[in-house]
């Protein structure tokens, strides 16, 4: 056993990690090709939509830390966690913390709405309909804002708990729980 496997525990399975980084790539490609490379933009949007469908299924049948039932908390719990952050006394979670879980749900919903409205613009019945195009663009721009908040939250949590969450999302392991950590 190496030092890393003794002091860390598996958290995010390979499919969660592949989903995460694939969605990052699909959204980045879609964002960068908007209004320039229509086919690439469309296909990256289809990939993003397919990834959301996969994650919804994996959130129901995947391993423990992938399941929504393990990490999704009530709005009250999310609010309490955010208040605890402001007071500097939030507890460390081995899996997703309540704010991270809320962000996951928001990002999945926004991605689904962006992909759906993008797909709608390719249909004859919706082609050229302004409100569909407007909603698509609003959702894509909202995604940029949410991604910025997500990255800020990851950086803050990494600093506060002295744990590299980006690395954890690459290797799938985090520091083993201790003290008041929540597994």
Image (cartoon, rainbow, N blue to C red):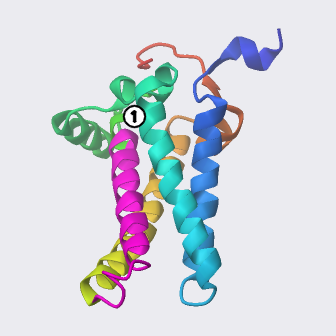
Look at the magenta stretch and give its main secondary structure: helix
Q: Is residue 6 left or right of residue 72?
A: right
> Quick one: 156 or 135, which is closer to the camera?
135
Does residue 151 appear in the picture of this structure? no
The verdict on residue 124 being magenta is yes
Give the residue furthest to the front: 124
User: Which residue is rendered at x = 36% and y = 86% of the image?
Assistant: 127
Residue 26 x %, y %:
60, 62
> Quick one: 14 or 150, which is closer to the camera?
14
Residue 92 x %, y %:
44, 28
**Mark 1 highlights which residue?**
97
Residue range (magenta): 100-129
Give the residue furthest to the left: 76
Residue 142, quarter of picture: bottom left
Give the residue furthest to the right: 2
Does residue 43 appear in the picture of this structure? yes
Residue 168, quarter of picture: top right
């Amino acid at each position: 056993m190496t030092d890393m496997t003794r002091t860390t525990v598996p958290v995010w399975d390979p499919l969660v990690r592949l989903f995460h980084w694939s969605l990052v790539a699909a959204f980045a490609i879609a964002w960068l090709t908007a209004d320039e490379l229509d086919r690439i933009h469309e296909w990256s949007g289809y990939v993003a939509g397919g990834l959301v469908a996969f994650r919804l299924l994996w959130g129901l049948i995947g391993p423990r830390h992938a399941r929504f039932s393990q990490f999704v908390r009530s709005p009250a719990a999310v609010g309490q966690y955010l208040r605890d952050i402001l007071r500097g006394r939030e507890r460390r979670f081995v899996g997703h913390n309540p704010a991270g879980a809320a962000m996951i749900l928001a990002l999945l919903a926004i991605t689904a709405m962006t992909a759906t409205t993008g797909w709608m613009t390719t249909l004859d019945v919706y082609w050229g309909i302004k409100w569909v195009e407007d909603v698509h663009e609003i959702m894509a721009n909202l995604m940029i804002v949410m991604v910025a908040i997500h990255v800020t939250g990851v950086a803050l949590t990494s600093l506060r708990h002295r744990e590299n969450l980006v690395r954890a999302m690459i290797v799938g392991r985090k520091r083993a729980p201790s003290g008041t950590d929540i597994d």
